Each structure stands twice: as structure tokens, then as C-alpha cells.
Image: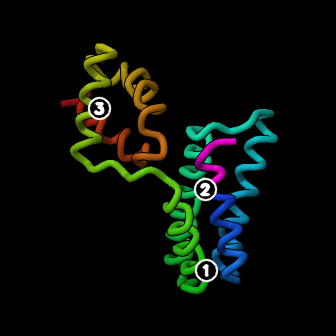
């Protein structure tokens, strides 16, 4: 089992001991999603796989948060915010904008990309490196700007 997965399970046990119901519920959602990913992939998840699952969960919750806020459902939005906080505890530190730009520039140079037709190749090179550390939508915008400019 991965170190990250062990940390999540330890946090779950600690939350249970502290009788923190909201945190236990959020961590159980994380554990269930990780278990489902293992079953779907028919493999034990490595740290990189766990980060990918957590990043996907974070994105889903951010999308839901926007919808709940737009609908005026502050009660549900608060739950989503809390779940995002819990998930972010286990994700690597997010990259700053200048770090993303440096990584994009390096990937463009490494792949020899010259125009928009090479965007898929550049994104493919960046995906493994940046997944969980940067919002891939933001990375896509930076790549698009770099290839057009």
C-alpha cells in the first residue's frame, strides 16, 4: 500500500478517535473512492494514482461548490468546502503560476512543439508531471497561450 494511502487511513482512525463526525465522513468518502479506483483498475494504487484520484475528487467538489453557490444553497456549499479542505491536506503543494509557466516552457522545448497542432503532445508530456500539483485547465490555458504567442 502507498504511503499516502496509509496517511489517509491513519487520519481516518484519528478522526474516529476524536469523534469528529464531519471529518470521518469526508475521509470515508476518500477511502471509498480509492477503493473503487483499485477495484476498477484491478491493481493496488501507487502514490501517483492516489494523487490522481484525490485531484479528480477535488475538481468534482469545486464544480459542485460553484453550482451550490449559484443556487444559493450555502448549507451544501459549506459541506463541499470542508471536503475540499480535507482532500487538499493529502495533495502535494499546488504549483505557483510561474512554476507552471516554467514547466510548460520546458515541455514545449522537450517535445519540439511549434504550434497549436502540437498541444496534445505537450499536454501529454505535462500530465504525469503536474497531475495533482496544478489544475490541468489552467495548464491547458498556459500551453495554448505559449503555442499561439
The alpha-carbon separation of the residues under discs 2 and 1 comes to 27 Å
Magenta stretch secondary structure, dominant: helix
Q: Which residue is mark 1?
A: 76
State the image quarter where residue 39 is shown.
top right
Residue 41 horizontal side relative to residue 58, left or right: right
Circle 2: element type: helix
Residue 148 higher or lower than 89, as above or below? above
Residue at the image point whose x is 56% and y is 38% from the top: 48
The front one of 99 and 78 is: 99
Residue 44 position, x and y percent, is 74, 37
The quarter in which the N terminus is drawn is top right
The front one of 9 and 148 is: 9
Residue 14 horizontal side relative to residue 74, left or right: right
Q: Over which residues does the magenta segment extend? A: 1-6
* Nearer to us: label 2 or label 3: 2
Q: Are marks 1 and 3 in contact (CB under 8 Å)?
A: no
Residue 115 position, x and y percent, is 28, 20
Total numbered labels:
3
Q: Are marks 2 and 3 in contact (CB under 8 Å)?
A: no
Residue 104's tag is 3
Circle 3: element type: helix
Residue at the image point whose x is 59% and y is 86% from the top: 75
State the image quarter where residue 86 is shown.
bottom right
Q: Neighbour class for label 1 at 10 Å: few (<14), some, many (≥20)?
A: some
Circle 1: element type: helix
Residue 86's tag is none
Q: Neighbour class for label 2 at 10 Å: few (<14), some, many (≥20)?
A: few
Residue 60 higher or lower than 131, as above or below? below
The front one of 130 and 91 is: 91
Q: Which residue is mark 2?
A: 7
Residue at the image point whose x is 23% and y is 32% from the top: 146
143 falls in the magenta region: no
Amino acid at each position: 500500500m502507498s504511503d499516502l494511502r496509509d496517511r489517509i487511513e491513519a487520519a481516518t482512525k484519528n478522526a474516529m478517535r476524536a469523534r469528529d463526525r464531519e471529518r470521518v465522513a469526508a475521509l470515508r468518502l476518500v477511502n471509498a473512492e480509492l477503493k473503487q479506483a483499485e477495484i476498477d483498475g484491478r491493481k493496488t494504487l501507487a502514490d501517483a494514482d492516489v494523487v490522481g484520484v484525490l485531484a479528480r475528487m477535488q475538481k468534482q467538489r469545486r464544480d459542485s461548490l460553484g453550482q451550490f453557490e449559484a443556487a444559493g444553497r450555502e448549507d451544501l456549499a459549506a459541506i463541499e468546502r470542508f471536503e475540499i479542505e480535507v482532500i487538499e491536506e493529502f495533495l502535494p503543494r499546488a504549483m505557483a503560476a510561474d512554476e507552471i509557466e516554467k514547466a510548460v516552457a520546458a515541455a514545449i522545448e522537450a517535445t519540439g512543439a511549434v504550434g497549436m497542432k502540437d498541444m496534445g503532445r505537450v499536454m501529454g508530456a505535462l500530465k504525469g508531471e503536474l497531475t495533482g500539483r496544478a489544475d490541468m485547465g489552467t495548464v491547458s490555458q498556459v500551453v495554448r497561450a505559449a503555442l499561439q504567442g
